[in-house]
Image: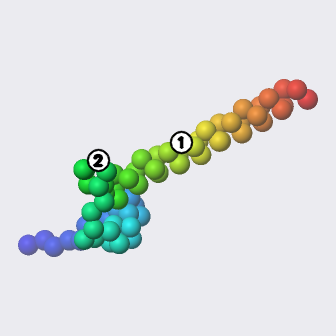
Amino acid sequence: MKISLKRKSRWERAIDPIASRLKGKTLTLNGKPVTAETTAKPAARAVGGLAMATVISAVISSLRGRGES
């Protein structure tokens, strides 16, 4: 018999503190339960997209600045 422990993914480790506070309580939106996973993933993607847009904007501004000098 083989016994092993499964390591949690980085995402699961990040969500655990939030999920533990919400245990026993159900937040609903339009009658559907809202979980930490369904809320946090889109939020993380939005923040990541905003960061990427900022980086791209900075690179474009830098390239424009070099061409004018």
Judging depth in this view, the residue of 12 and 44 nearest the camera is 44
Q: Between marks 2 and 1, how big is the CA–CA gap? A: 27 Å
Query: What is the three-letter code of the residue carrying label 1?
Result: Gly
| Residue that mark 1 sits on | 49
Is residue 7 shown to the viewer in this render? no
Quadrant holding the C terminus = top right
| Residue that mark 2 sits on | 30
Q: Is residue 69 left or right of residue 24?
A: right
Is residue 58 shown to the viewer in this render? yes
Against 25, residue 36 (above or below) is: above
Q: Nearer the viewer, mark 2 or mark 1?
A: 2
Tally the numbered discs: 2
Look at 31% across and 60% down and name the residue there.
27
Residue 58: horizontal and vertical position, in percent? 72, 39
Which residue is outermost to the top?
67
Query: What is the three-letter code of the residue carrying label 2?
Result: Asn
In terms of secondary structure, where does tag 1 sit?
A: helix
Look at 41% across and 54% down and name the residue there.
40
